[in-house]
Image (cartoon, rainbow, N blue to C red):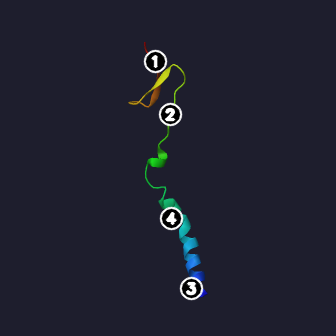
Amino acid sequence: MKIKLTLAAIALTMAPSLGMAMCSGDDHAKATMSCADGKVLDSATNTCVPVSG
């Protein structure tokens, strides 16, 4: 019984750190941007610019 309790305590202690490890990298920081009507996204400057033409 003591071994089960120890393993459960270790698992509960490590759970938050394992969850944070899954969030590493830049994939979660990427966002989709949309512009208002009549404007398009300029990928060089990441701003919305009016449609010309």
Q: Nearer the viewer, mark 3 or mark 2?
A: 3
Asked which secondary structure carries label 3, the reply is helix
Q: Nearer the viewer, mark 4 or mark 3?
A: 3
Residue occupied by mark 1: 51
The label shown at residue 18 is 4
The quadrant in which the C terminus is found is top left
Residue occupied by mark 2: 33
Residue type, numbered disc 2: Met
Quadrant of residue 4 within the rendered picture: bottom right
Give how far apart the Cα atoms at labels 4 and 1 are. Answer: 46 Å
Give how far apart the Cα atoms at labels 3 and 1 are. Answer: 67 Å
Give how far apart the Cα atoms at labels 3 and 2 are. Answer: 51 Å
Give how far apart the Cα atoms at labels 1 and 2 are. Answer: 16 Å
Asked which secondary structure carries label 2, the reply is loop
Residue 43: x and y in percent read 40, 30
Residue type, numbered disc 4: Leu
Q: Residue furthest top?
A: 53
Q: Are marks 3 and 2 in contact (CB under 8 Å)?
A: no
